[in-house]
Image (spheres, grey):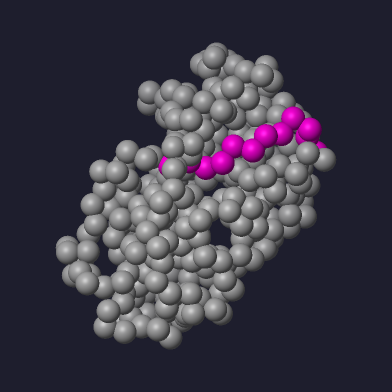
Amino acid sequence: MNILFIPHVPNTTVINRVYEFAKNSNSYYLYWEINNSSLLSKIKSQILSLKYEINGKKIKIPLLFKPEKFATKINTFMLNKLIKKLKIDVVVNANALLFDIKNIFVPVIYDLVDDHISENSDIGLNKTRVKKIKKDIKNSKGVICVTEILEEKIKSLNKKTITIENGVYIDRFQKAKSLKKELNLEGKKVFGFIGGIEKWTGIEKAIKEYLKIKNNSTKFLIVGGNNGEFYKNLVKKYNKDVLFIGRISPSEVANYFKTIDVGLIPFELNNFTNNALPIKALEYGLAGSYVISTPLKGLKIKNFPFIEFCEIDKFHNCMKKEFDEVKYDFSSYAWKKQSKKVEKFIKGLI
């Protein structure tokens, strides 16, 4: 069975749920350029995304971003040409905007990586876009959701819905080593945040909470970054109090997780964040780090023993605590096992 996976966002510098499913099932996956940090970057991304390239299982086809209605028609036409060429049997799509699911030649399984059926101006989910996403979900053969909460919401649109959570690469974390010595952090309690950095992640509020308990035996480590103004201003404002690492190679990520004693998930609470299962929650725990998180519904329902939930303005109190060693069996969340679940679900539908 030839499967083509389409990601929500084509980011290969971090663990990307859809790409991990593709890699672990030896399937094709779509990639394109995207950079929204400035108008010039957007234009450059659009030009670069007009390429056609097949590099093993990694595929590029010409794609348009604007205007949305016209672009969707052109993108679906180009996708169907690729489907014919590679003899694709099924498409697993996580992208909300680029394609018209109803007009794709083969069955489509929709992978809902976040809550994209609720309006959210912070991530560009306006009424028109949400309407399109709901229509695409209805026209899909089935739906894979990242959390049980999302599954319950989606069943009113498509009854053939299942929950398959994010996964982890257990072997990478078993081989990982702490970088405390290299970063001059030995003897310190390290609080950390690893991942994409935007205002909605609550990262600035987390920094302010950390500053309330900061002393000579603590450090705040932030890994990740972008070219946006929010991140640039964050570094400028707090670089004396926080160690900003910036972007790193995917091969180094596990080492940084291993360096952190307490991982932070300070996300703002809304439908988008509440119904998600952040991969970093699993990766913090797998690396041996306890986790402090805002009370995200998608996380709370999992009842992980290594996560402490508290409101963002109470983070400083939680940061004062001493946590037990993390002891948890993560084997059921291995990417290979999660990918097998995806394949089994697809076969049951087509």
Quarter of the image for residue 227 reads bottom left
258 up-or-down from 152: above or below = below
User: Front-most of 31 and 304?
Assistant: 304
Left or right of residue 199: residue 69: right
Main SS category, magenta section: loop
| Residue plotted at (52% across, 26% down) | 340
At which x and y percent is residue 106?
66, 20
Q: Which residues are magenta?
A: 157-168
204 up-or-down from 22: above or below = below
Q: Which image quarter is the C terminus in?
A: top right
Q: Which image quarter is the N terminus in?
A: top right
291 up-or-down from 21: above or below = below
At which x and y percent is residue 324?
40, 63
| Residue plotted at (49% across, 66% down) | 292
Left or right of residue 152: residue 196: left
How many marks can you see?
Answer: 0
Q: Confirm whether residue 101 shows in the render.
A: no
| Residue plotted at (61% across, 34% down) | 93
| Residue plotted at (37% across, 69% down) | 191
Left or right of residue 308: residue 227: left
**Which residue is most to the right?**
156
Quarter of the image for residue 72 reads top right
At which x and y percent is residue 345?
63, 25
User: Front-most of 259 and 309?
Assistant: 309
Quarter of the image for residue 251 reads top left
